Structures are given as structure tokens and as C-alpha cells.
Image (tube, rainbow, N blue to C red):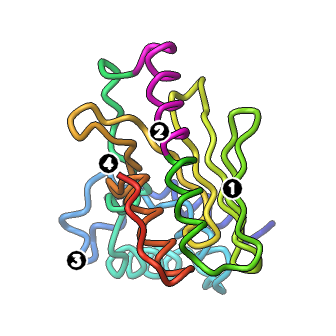
């Protein structure tokens, strides 16, 4: 608790008192330590005197690479939704049902061409399930409130696909991957035979 009080009091120091350090001249009052940095301070032994604390704090700020908690890896962030293109419910059902029924037919045909123990395709309660025995199970279903098709894959895990009017396909917003394209690649990888789902 004493360390916590010391660290909190550190954050209340006047920045002018820290600017005596040459490297602190460019430090502005709008930059603050991120919470994870404060946690690092709590875990480190702190010097006892206030002047030592000021030096410790100034040195730590000078060596810190960022003062923002809002650093985001943009490659991991989904693309923004264009809400003007969100489907009406009846249009969503038409497109999603068409895609799932098309998949059902193609996957049944594919099952006749591959030698996989336990291969089975089933459609019920608006859920398409494809079992590949020991290789795993795929599940494809509609998510009406989100206007999405969800895929559960034994290879790539769960994915959510939005209808993309420009490509006329169900697309995963994180990486722009196409639902049918993902299934084609993964089924060839698992079963050893290529399949055309378009």
C-alpha cells in the first residue's frame, strides 16, 4: 500500500520539477504514463528520498517509448462497418440461405470424391454441419441480428462473415477473406483433394 501511495504521489509531481532533466524539456503536460507503466513502477523497488524519486521518475519517462494507452495494431482491428450497406432482414435471409444451400450441395458432392472416414454433411435448424471424422467438424450458421454468417472451423477457429455487395461474397472483415475461399483452402489441406465451392 505504501508503494501505491508513493507511485500515486509521483504522478502528481509538478512537471516543471521534472523538466530540470535535460531530456525532459520536450515533455508536455498532455502526456501521461500508461497504466501498465504505473504497474511496472509498483513492482520495482522505489528509492526513499523525494529527490531520488524525482530522478527515478524522470529517467523512467525518458526511457519510455510511449505515453499513450491507445496504441493499436491496426492489422488486428476489423474494418469499419458501412452501415449504409447493412442488409434488410429479408434480403439477409435470401442471401444467407442461398449460400448455405449452395454449400450443402457442393459439400455433399465433395464427400463422394474424398476418402475420409466419418465424412458427413447435415443441414437442420438453419445450421450446416460437416463432420470429417478425426479431422474435426465445421459448422456454418446464420446470425440474423448481426446480418452475418458464422463459421466454426477445426483449422482457423471461429469467423464472422458480412455480405460484401462489391464482391458479391461473404467476407471476414479482419482480413477480407472470402467464406468459400477459406473452405476451399482448408478442405484441400485436411482431405487432400481440391474442391470448387463457387
Question: Which numbered tag is attached to residue 77?
Answer: none
* Residue underneath mark 2: 99
Q: Residues within 10 Å of mark 3 (few under 14, many from 20)?
A: some
* Image-quadrant location for residue 88: top left
Alpha carbons under labels 2 and 4: distance apart = 51 Å
User: Mark 2 or mark 3, which has the lower sequence index?
Assistant: 3
Query: For the point 41% across and 50% down, which residue is it?
Result: 172
Q: Position of residue 19 (x, y in %)?
A: 28, 67
Locate the N terminus by quadrant: bottom right
Secondary structure beneath label 2:
helix
* Residue underneath mark 4: 30
Secondary structure beneath label 3:
helix
Along the viewing direction, whichever of 162 and 23 lies nearer the viewer: 162
Alpha carbons under labels 4 and 1: distance apart = 59 Å
Pair 1/3: label in front:
1
Along the viewing direction, whichever of 148 and 11 lies nearer the viewer: 148
Q: Position of residue 6 (x, y in %)?
A: 66, 67
User: Mark 1 or mark 3, which has the lower sequence index?
Assistant: 3
Q: Position of residue 129 (x, y in %)?
A: 70, 52
In this picture, which residue range is highlighted in magenta? 87-102
Along the viewing direction, whichever of 167 and 198 lies nearer the viewer: 198
Q: Residues within 10 Å of mark 4 (few under 14, many from 20)?
A: few
Q: Confirm whether the magenta stretch covers residue 101.
A: yes
Alpha carbons under labels 2 and 1: distance apart = 15 Å
Using residue 112 as the reference point, say whether residue 177 is left or right of it.
left
User: Mark 2 or mark 4, which has the lower sequence index?
Assistant: 4
Along the viewing direction, whichever of 169 and 111 lies nearer the viewer: 111
Q: Position of residue 146 (x, y in %)?
A: 55, 29
**CB within 8 Å, label 1 to label 3:** no
Magenta region, mostly helix, strand or loop? helix
Pair 2/4: label in front:
2
Amino acid at each position: 500500500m505504501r508503494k501505491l501511495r508513493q507511485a500515486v504521489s509521483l504522478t502528481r509531481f509538478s512537471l516543471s520539477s521534472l523538466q530540470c532533466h535535460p531530456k525532459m524539456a520536450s515533455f508536455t503536460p498532455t502526456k501521461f504514463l500508461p497504466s501498465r507503466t504505473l504497474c511496472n513502477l509498483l513492482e520495482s523497488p522505489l528509492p526513499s528520498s523525494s529527490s531520488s524519486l524525482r530522478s527515478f521518475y524522470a529517467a523512467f519517462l525518458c526511457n519510455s517509448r510511449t505515453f499513450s494507452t491507445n496504441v493499436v495494431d491496426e492489422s488486428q482491428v476489423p474494418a469499419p462497418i458501412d452501415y449504409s450497406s447493412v442488409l434488410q432482414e429479408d434480403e439477409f435471409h435470401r442471401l444467407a440461405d442461398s449460400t448455405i444451400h449452395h454449400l450443402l450441395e457442393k459439400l455433399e458432392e465433395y464427400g463422394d470424391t474424398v476418402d475420409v472416414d466419418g465424412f458427413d454433411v447435415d443441414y437442420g435448424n438453419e445450421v450446416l454441419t460437416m463432420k470429417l471424422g478425426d479431422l474435426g467438424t465445421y459448422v456454418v450458421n446464420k446470425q440474423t441480428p448481426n446480418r452475418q454468417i458464422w463459421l466454426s472451423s477445426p483449422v482457423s477457429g471461429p469467423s464472422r462473415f458480412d455480405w460484401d455487395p462489391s464482391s458479391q461474397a461473404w467476407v471476414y472483415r479482419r482480413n477480407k477473406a472470402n467464406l468459400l475461399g477459406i473452405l476451399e483452402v482448408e478442405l484441400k489441406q485436411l482431405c487432400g483433394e481440391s474442391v470448387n465451392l463457387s
